[in-house]
Image (spheres, rainbow, N blue to C red):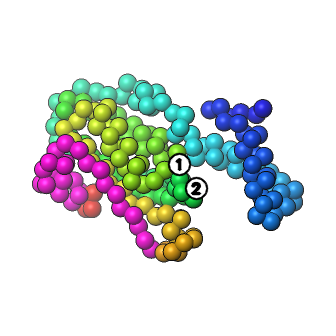
């Protein structure tokens, strides 16, 4: 049994993709498709790698004591995920802010946390909340805010076929939830 580094059964995925190609009316043995099952298996190994990641390994002790209590924002972070309803991609940008309470995080860890959750079958609403809740727990911050704006291929390629639609979700905690002025400062800064 061929397994990926993370333990996925590559051969089983290949077999299923081979069957899928047959079921949709293709010849999985034709030249252009002969290696497709293996390519798809490897792609799904990567696209679902978030299930097999460990938050502590991602953080890698990159939490630092810091007296700063000003807003920290990481914006325009690219996001790519798969919709759990149709297994089609959705993609866009995430904006993350937090107000430290004596702890800051290495800035590269924020996109890594986003990717850990995005590389799973998802709905955008849950993804937004998971990022906010995880950062809030790790940082013990005075507040965390996450806004995500994405395009969904399940809305663009099939179904309603709306090419210019975006889905915007937010999840806030602490001072971002309690204080409208703080929330508005965040929204103004991500839109500047």
Residue under the point 46% across and 64% down = 151
Horizontal side, residue 86 vs residue 75: left or right: right
Q: Is residue 165 magenta?
A: yes
The percent coordinates of residue 66 (x first, y second) are 21, 29
First in sequence: mark 1 or mark 2? 2
On screen, residue 192 above or below 171: below
Rendering coords of residue 127 (x, y %)? 41, 48
Residue at point 75% right, 56% down? 20
Residue 62 position, x and y percent, is 36, 28
| Res 121 label | 1
Image quarter for residue 12?
A: top right
Say which quadrant the C terminus sits in: bottom left
Q: Is residue 119 magenta?
A: no
Residue 87 got which mark?
2
Residue stretch in magenta? 164-189
Mark 1 closeness class: few <14, some 14–19, many ≥20 residues within 10 Å: many
* 87 displayed left or right of 189: right
For the image, the number of numbered tags is 2
Provide the secondary structure element on which disc 2 rests. Answer: loop
Q: Are marks 1 and 2 in contact (CB under 8 Å)?
A: yes
């Amino acid at each position: 049994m061929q397994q990926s580094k993370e333990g996925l059964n590559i051969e089983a995925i290949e077999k299923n993709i081979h069957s899928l190609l047959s079921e949709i009316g293709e010849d999985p043995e034709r030249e252009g498709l002969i290696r497709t099952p293996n390519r798809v298996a490897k792609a799904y190994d990567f696209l679902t790698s978030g299930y097999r990641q460990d938050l502590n390994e991602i953080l890698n002790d990159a939490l630092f004591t810091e007296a700063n209590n000003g807003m920290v924002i990481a914006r325009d972070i690219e996001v790519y995920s798969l919709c759990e309803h149709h297994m089609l991609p959705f993609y866009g940008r995430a904006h993350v802010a937090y107000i430290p309470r004596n702890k800051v995080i290495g800035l590269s860890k924020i996109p890594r946390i986003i990717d850990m959750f995005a590389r799973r079958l998802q709905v955008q609403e849950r993804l937004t909340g998971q990022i906010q809740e995880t950062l809030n727990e790790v940082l013990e911050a005075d507040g965390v805010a996450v806004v995500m704006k994405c395009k969904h291929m399940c809305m663009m390629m099939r179904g309603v076929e709306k090419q210019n639609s975006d889905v915007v979700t937010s999840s806030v905690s602490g001072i971002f939830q309690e204080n409208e002025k703080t929330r508005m400062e965040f929204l103004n800064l991500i839109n500047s």
